């Protein structure tokens, strides 16, 4: 039985895994950005090989150094335990370095030491990263044995920017005595103490460290690095009072988070959010132009677009034809499409012309609301509703004229940057036609109903100007929406092939 307890401390079950199956792929995409995994091997001070992986962005701007967090696994863990940490850190422009400690995973060594020798492995990794010009400041994130390792090393290296300590034990001897009670080993107390002393000598002989030296609480008052402590409230292996003792004695800026679960349970999302915010505040990662901002730049710089050899010109002319249908001089779409093949103007010039024609430039566009004296007419509800219905139908026809044959690809294009447009179209399709007409009438014809109920208290010119401005804004928004969709279609034209509408 004593031999089993010795192995429980220095030779727990060892993680055996295939890196190609259990780690992130050598090249992968996360949150819309590309990253890569760099595998390497370091040698610690005891000439043992350490298998390591470094997760970095696929492209790093020139002369830019990124902060790095080193993830330290538990006594039976390996570098695959850091997969969740990659999801938390990489989108914030914080690289992630993870390793198999000596005696764990695929690294060399026969025994673990619950943090005593692992801090030397960690020192080797930190020294390697210090010599990397693409790494700025360094943070440590440890769990269980890894948390103890991080705290022991942080007491020696104050240059570490921040510590996240999840489920650390305060004293190894006290932990071993507690586990006897937890697992209900029915032996007298004095027998247990004698057995622990015997185990102490065996461990010293095999793993070359003294369990009495792992009194983590004594290192807490010597450490001034900002730290975030975490512990599961139902942890029966390392009970929460261990973290409470370390947190109380810790000298640096500190915060403590407790959550539901046990020692090995998945951590809740709010805890990961707290870790992300903590590292963002202490590491100050640089901000890269996001994918969204790049797309917006392309959106507003479309005037410089050139139709190259790889551009589907027939697709572009077909989309422009849809814009033409929204103009006041809209003609037959089939006839217009036939004339595009012989067009002498560029795609961009044609697009500019059609968008300009969408804006309201004269009062003639509002004649349906004015009488011969240019005053607001006493139009009845049916007439206004009929006119607005015709206008809405024309807009719907031009919006769908070149996309009705492939609605699935249109949805994918909309998701790139026009979620509001997509949701609006989706909602509109679910509303019955008669309700949609009444909603439109209430939105645009409210001034007309007020005219019938009471005399005009506002000058007629001001009323005309207000209504003219509303409809002009509506037309401009419709033209801008079509232009935006056109640009989004350009971005995805290599992936989405459209066919002409029937």
Image: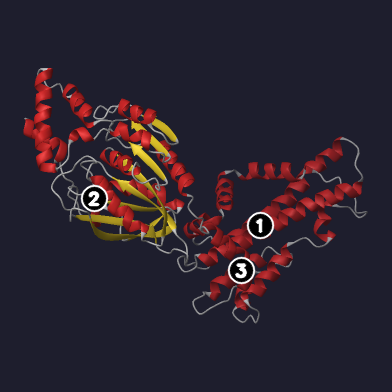
Q: Position of residue 415 (x, y in %)?
A: 51, 54
Residue 3 sits in quarter: top left
Disc 1 from disc 2: Cα separation: 62 Å
Q: Secondary structure at mark 1?
A: helix
The quarter of the image holding the N terminus is top left
Q: Secondary structure at mark 2?
A: loop
Q: Nearer the viewer, mark 1 or mark 3?
A: 3
Q: Nearer the viewer, mark 1 or mark 2?
A: 2
Q: Residue at x 25, y 48 (%)?
A: 120
Label 2, on which residue? 100
Q: Nearer the viewer, residue 401 or 487?
A: 487
> Which of disc 3 and disc 2 is earlier in sequence?
2
Q: Nearer the viewer, residue 472 or 143?
A: 143
Q: Secondary structure at mark 3?
A: helix
> Which of disc 2 and disc 1 is earlier in sequence?
2
Q: Position of residue 60 (x, y in %)?
A: 44, 63
Residue 225 sits in quarter: top left
Q: Nearer the viewer, residue 437 or 40?
A: 40
Left or right of 395? Residue 448 is right
Q: Which mark is residue 302?
A: 3
Left or right of 375? Residue 233 is left
Q: Residues within 10 Å of mark 2 (few under 14, many from 20)?
A: many
Q: Nearer the viewer, mark 2 or mark 3?
A: 2
Label 1, on which residue? 395
Q: Residue at x 20, y 32 (%)?
A: 212
Q: Nearer the viewer, residue 61 or 441?
A: 61
Q: Residues within 10 Å of mark 1 (few under 14, many from 20)?
A: many
């Amino acid at each position: 039985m004593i031999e089993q307890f010795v192995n429980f401390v220095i030779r727990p079950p060892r993680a055996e895994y295939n890196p190609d199956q259990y780690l992130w792929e050598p090249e992968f995409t996360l949150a819309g950005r590309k990253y890569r995994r760099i595998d390497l091997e370091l040698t610690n001070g005891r000439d043992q090989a350490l298998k390591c992986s470094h997760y970095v962005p696929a492209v790093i701007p020139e002369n830019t150094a990124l902060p790095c967090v080193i993830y330290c696994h538990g006594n039976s863990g390996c570098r695959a335990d850091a997969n969740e940490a990659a999801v938390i850190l990489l989108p914030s422009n914080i690289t992630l370095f993870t390793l198999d400690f000596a005696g764990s995973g695929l690294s060399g060594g026969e025994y673990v030491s619950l943090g005593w020798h692992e801090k030397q492995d960690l020192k080797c990794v930190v020294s390697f990263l210090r010599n990397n010009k693409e790494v700025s400041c360094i943070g440590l994130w440890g769990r269980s044995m890894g948390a103890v390792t991080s705290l022991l090393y942080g007491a020696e290296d104050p240059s570490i920017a921040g510590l996240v300590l999840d489920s650390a034990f305060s004293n190894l001897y006290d932990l071993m005595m507690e586990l006897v009670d937890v697992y209900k080993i029915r032996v007298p107390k004095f027998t247990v103490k004698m057995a622990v002393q015997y185990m102490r000598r065996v461990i010293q002989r095999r793993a070359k460290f003294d369990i009495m030296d792992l009194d983590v609480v004594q290192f807490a008052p010597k450490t001034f690095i900002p730290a975030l402590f975490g512990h599961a409230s139902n942890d029966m292996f390392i009970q929460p009072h261990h973290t409470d003792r370390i947190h109380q004695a810790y000298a640096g800026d500190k915060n403590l988070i407790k959550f539901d679960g046990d020692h090995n349970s998945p951590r809740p999302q709010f805890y990961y959010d707290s870790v992300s915010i903590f590292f963002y505040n202490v590491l100050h990662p640089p901000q890269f132009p996001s994918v969204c901002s790049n797309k917006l730049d392309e959106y507003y710089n479309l005037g410089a677009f050139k139709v190259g050899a790889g551009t589907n010109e027939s697709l572009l002319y077909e989309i422009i034809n849809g814009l033409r249908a929204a103009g006041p001089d809209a003609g037959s779409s089939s006839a217009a499409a036939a004339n595009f093949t012989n067009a002498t103007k560029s795609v961009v010039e044609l697009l500019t012309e059609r968008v300009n024609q969408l804006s309201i430039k004269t009062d003639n566009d509002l004649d349906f609301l004015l009488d011969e004296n240019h005053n607001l007419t006493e139009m009845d509800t049916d007439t206004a509703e009929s006119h607005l219905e015709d206008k809405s139908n024309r807009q719907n026809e031009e919006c769908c004229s070149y996309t009705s044959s492939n609605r699935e690809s249109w949805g994918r294009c909309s998701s790139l940057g026009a979620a509001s447009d997509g949701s609006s179209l989706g909602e509109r399709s679910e509303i019955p036609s008669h309700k949609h007409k009444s909603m439109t009438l209430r939105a645009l014809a409210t001034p007309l109903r007020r005219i019938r109920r009471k005399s005009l208290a506002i000058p007629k010119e001001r009323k005309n100007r207000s209504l003219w401005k509303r409809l002009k804004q509506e037309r401009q928004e419709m033209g801008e929406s079509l232009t935006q969709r056109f640009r989004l279609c350009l971005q995805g034209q290599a992936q989405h092939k459209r066919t002409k509408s029937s």
